[in-house]
Image (spheres, helix red, strand yellow):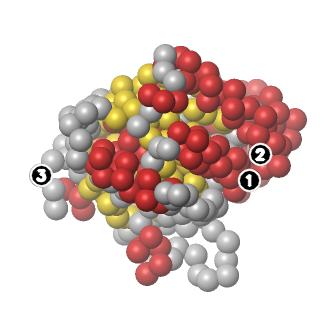
């Protein structure tokens, strides 16, 4: 009997250098969205999203003020089959029309990751299709290519609830870390400060709405790592200071002013570190493209400040369409399709990984957190 690894290798070899489109089902369950998408990758590298279905768990977690891992995993189990079926139906395809399956294998809440990863493997086995275990962060890295032509290489700011990194992206599976957070991610700071202000869950969008009515100049919030010349980030001091101020506020206008101050402080730090990275990147590359991806890229103030920083350095600015900033399966399908095009197929025993750095060599040689300490997911 032919085993799956042999089958995957044969399928990948047939598609790796094919001049035919590749149609991929992507599965994403790394946090609190159960998502499935069908994406078609053209031989020229253009991506067409045939379907993108997302089941949000916001209502399930709202009472707790944040994502509860066990509740998230159970919801994924209940929803994954129906979400995938809807994605296939909306695409107008059957499973037999697919060229491969990609699923998030990490990083993320490992219980949820296991659900989507197992479902993706099951579809691949049942249909004798090649399977690709996708790094969730690599999905974000390629997400801008869902809405526009973005050629490699480019400079990437990946900024979300669990991650805040600057990376040089030379191609799929070929990325170098230039900077990362040494404590909290920007999205985490947004959410936790919003929670301290009593804004509910999800906190980031609520804080952005409130900030639109505020004047942040009232508050002098701390600026992190001012003496350092690298591209690393730190948001824990800002989070602590803002949370303490939040306990003293008396009026709705006070809260709006603090929200605006927090949003401006986060955007400023992201722009300062990105500016350093752009200066370094420009010394080594003629093509200057600055991509911002991840959930925080949906924040309009952050986008505007980063776009202005890119313009000052002569970089073109690209961000994914709003629908593909937050977690979604279209980016996972695209990353899987690009890997499949190169023949990068995963074994059926590919594990679920709670932590999975994009630049594994740098993570080993220069870890952000010493051995034995628990750090950011990346």
Mark 2 or mark 3: which is in front?
2
Quarter of the image that includes the C terminus: bottom right
Seen at 44% across and 53% down, the residue is: 7
According to the image, label 1 marks what residue? Answer: 111
Q: Are marks 2 and 3 in contact (CB under 8 Å)?
A: no
Which residue is nearer to you in this view: 75 or 324? 75
Give coordinates of residue 232: x percent, y percent. Answer: 45, 64
| Left or right position of 338 against 366 | left
Seen at 41% across and 37% down, the residue is: 99
Element carrying mark 3 = loop
Give coordinates of residue 142: x percent, y percent. Answer: 38, 43
Q: Earlier in the sequence, mark 1 or mark 3?
A: 1
Looking at this rendering, what residue extends furthest in the left direction? Answer: 286
Q: Are marks 1 and 2 in contact (CB under 8 Å)?
A: yes
According to the image, label 3 marks what residue? Answer: 286
| Left or right position of 72 against 91 | right
Question: Which picture quadrant has residue 304?
Answer: top left
- Residue 201 visible in the snapshot: no
| Left or right position of 139 against 78 | left
Question: Which picture quadrant has residue 124?
Answer: top right
Give coordinates of residue 199: x percent, y percent. Answer: 76, 33
Which residue is nearer to you in this view: 306 or 20? 20
Mark 1 or mark 3: which is in front?
1
Looking at this rendering, what residue extends furthest in the right direction? Answer: 63
- Residue 100 visible in the snapshot: yes
Question: Which picture quadrant has residue 60?
Answer: top right
Seen at 34% across and 35% down, the residue is: 22
Q: In the rendered view, would you say 176 is above or below 42? A: below
Q: Earlier in the sequence, mark 2 or mark 3?
A: 2
Which residue is nearer to you in this view: 193 or 337? 337
Element carrying mark 1 = helix
Label at residue 73: 2
């Amino acid at each position: 009997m032919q085993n799956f690894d042999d089958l995957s290798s044969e399928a990948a070899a047939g598609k790796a250098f094919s001049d035919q489109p590749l149609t991929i089902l992507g599965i994403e369950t790394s946090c609190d969205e159960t998502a499935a998408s069908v994406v078609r990758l053209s031989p020229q590298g253009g991506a067409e999203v045939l379907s993108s279905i997302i089941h949000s768990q916001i209502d399930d977690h709202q009472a707790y003020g944040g994502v509860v891992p066990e509740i998230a995993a159970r919801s994924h189990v209940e929803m994954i089959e129906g979400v995938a079926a809807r994605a296939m139906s909306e695409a107008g395809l059957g499973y037999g029309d697919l060229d491969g399956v990609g699923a998030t294998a990490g990083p993320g809440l490992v219980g949820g990751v296991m659900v989507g990863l197992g479902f993706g493997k099951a579809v691949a086995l049942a249909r004798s299709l090649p399977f690709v275990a996708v790094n969730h962060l690599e999905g974000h890295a390629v997400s801008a290519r869902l809405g526009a032509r973005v050629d490699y290489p480019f400079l990437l700011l990946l900024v979300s609830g669990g991650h805040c990194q600057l990376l040089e992206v030379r191609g799929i599976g070929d990325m170098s870390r230039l900077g990362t957070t040494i404590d909290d991610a920007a999205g985490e700071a947004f959410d936790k400060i919003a929670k301290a202000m009593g804004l509910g869950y999800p906190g980031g969008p609520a804080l952005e709405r409130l900030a639109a009515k505020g004047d942040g100049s009232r508050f002098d919030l701390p600026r992190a790592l001012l003496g350092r010349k690298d591209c690393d980030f730190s948001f824990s001091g800002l989070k602590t200071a803002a949370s303490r101020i939040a306990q003293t506020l008396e009026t709705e206008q006070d809260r709006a002013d603090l929200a605006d101050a927090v949003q401006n402080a986060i955007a400023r730090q992201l722009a300062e570190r990105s500016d350093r990275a752009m200066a370094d990147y420009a010394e080594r590359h003629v093509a200057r493209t600055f991509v911002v991806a991840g959930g925080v890229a949906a924040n309009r103030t952050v986008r505007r400040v980063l776009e202005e920083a890119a313009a000052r350095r002569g970089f073109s600015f690209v961000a994914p369409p709003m629908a593909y900033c937050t977690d979604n399966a279209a980016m996972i399908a695209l990353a899987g399709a690009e890997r499949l095009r190169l023949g990068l197929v995963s074994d059926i025993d590919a594990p679920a990984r709670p932590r999975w750095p994009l630049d594994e060599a740098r993570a080993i040689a220069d870890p952000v957190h010493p051995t034995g300490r628990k750090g950011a997911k990346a």
